[in-house]
Amino acid sequence: MAERIDGKQVAADVRAKVGEAVKTLPGQPTLAVVLVGEDPASQVYVRNKVRQTEEAGMRSLHHHLPVDASQDEVEALISRLNGDDEVDGILLQLPLPKGLDEQRAIECIAPAKDVDGLTEASAGRLVLGKDGLRPCTPTGCVILAKSVLGDDLSGKNVVVIGRSILVGKPAALLFLAENCTVTIAHSRTKDLAALCRTADILVPAVGRPEMVKGDWVKPGAVLIDVGINRIDAPEKGEGKTRLVGDADFGDCEKVAGHITPVPGGVGPMTIACLLRNTVIAACYRRGWALPSGL
Ligand SMILES: Nc1nc2c(c(=O)[nH]1)N[C@@H](CN(C=O)c1ccc(C(=O)N[C@@H](CCC(=O)O)C(=O)O)cc1)CN2
């Protein structure tokens, strides 16, 4: 049976290191979180981001725009935060309400404050192998893999399933930067199961509940499941739901060496890595030395 990778614990360790790092800084980093609309899941994530930022000793500003906010209003708020010298990081919570252009809004974020690592400038720096702010969930995937394999991932075969801008593509580039041999699989990939069986580290990130089965997994592989899918759970009672990943946990844990659960795997790493990016952004921007051990 696979050993479970405790994402909650690894995330708590990252947050503790961030908290220690903050204490050594000459000033207090500030994260501005922008929420547009009333999406219930986004509201929970934003509340957690604000709370965990403050728990790590940083300042957080929460801006909430109504669901009918225009593109101009969203961009004007971001421009104001770009110009606010107190603000080190800007986080635009996704998804935006229908009708708003996410990529255009993200592009308004000053690259120096792009703690989500989603602007073209941040993506370009990642492709070029230059230092910079990296997307949070993919960074969390690498940290989780290292938590069980050690810091040296070189030579590992990694298969990332999914090519999204938020996770799939940056995850592939981050594992490549660790000298892994990376393949990105997607909806047109032929014989996906056979390809997945070549992976020492398998990273499904497609949003398809329990798609990856046990016989897709190489015995002993590390399975980092990015999917967070809510499905009906009639066994818990009428109208009840539960969260599952992109991997069929019960089936895959019989084959993998290590596996992340859902919930409690990759999810908590997203916010921990955001806090880490906020410290990094503050240090770059204000010319502070980057604390060691981050
Ligand atoms: N601007 C961004 N928007 C979104 C991102 C992001 O990285 N940047 N990622 C997701 C949402 N997200 C953070 O924003 C996020 C998702 C999930 C979790 C998490 O801890 N999940 C728990 C389960 C929670 C539950 O019960 O529903 C887990 O997996 O254990 C944290 C953050 C999309 N938007």
Image (tube, grey):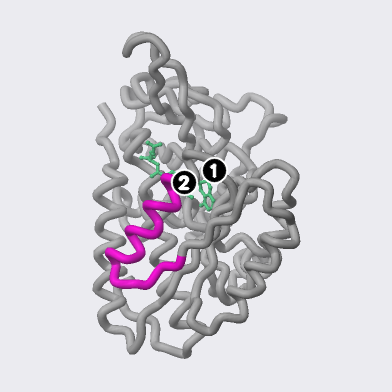
Left or right relative to 257: residue 280:
right
Q: Which residue is mark 2?
A: 43
Amino acid type for the residue under numbered disc 2: Gln
Q: Measuring from the top left, give residue 102's x and y in whole percent.
A: 69, 52
Q: Residues within 10 Å of mark 2 (few under 14, many from 20)?
A: some
Image quarter in which the C terminus is found: bottom left
Q: Measuring from the top left, give residue 244's x and y in whole percent.
A: 42, 27
Q: Measuring from the top left, give residue 202's x and y in whole percent.
A: 47, 38
Q: Nearer the viewer, residue 7 or 1?
A: 7
Q: Measuring from the top left, give residue 264's x and y in whole percent.
A: 32, 39
Q: Which residue is mark 1?
A: 38
Picture quarter containing residue 34?
A: bottom right
Q: Is residue 128 visible in the rendered structure shown here?
A: no
Tally the marks: 2
Q: Is residue 7 visible in the rendered structure shown here?
A: yes
**Which region is colored magenta?**
44-61
Q: Residues within 10 Å of mark 1 (few under 14, many from 20)?
A: some
Does 229 lie within the magenta span? no
Does 47 lie within the magenta span? yes
Mark 2 and mark 1 residues within 8 Å of each other at the beta carbon: yes
Left or right relative to 166: residue 215:
left
Secondary structure beneath label 2: helix
Secondary structure beneath label 1: loop
Does the beta carbon at disc 1 come under 8 Å from ligand 1? no
- The mark nearer the N terminus, 2 or 1, is 1
Amino acid type for the residue under numbered disc 1: Glu
Image quarter in which the N terminus is found: top left
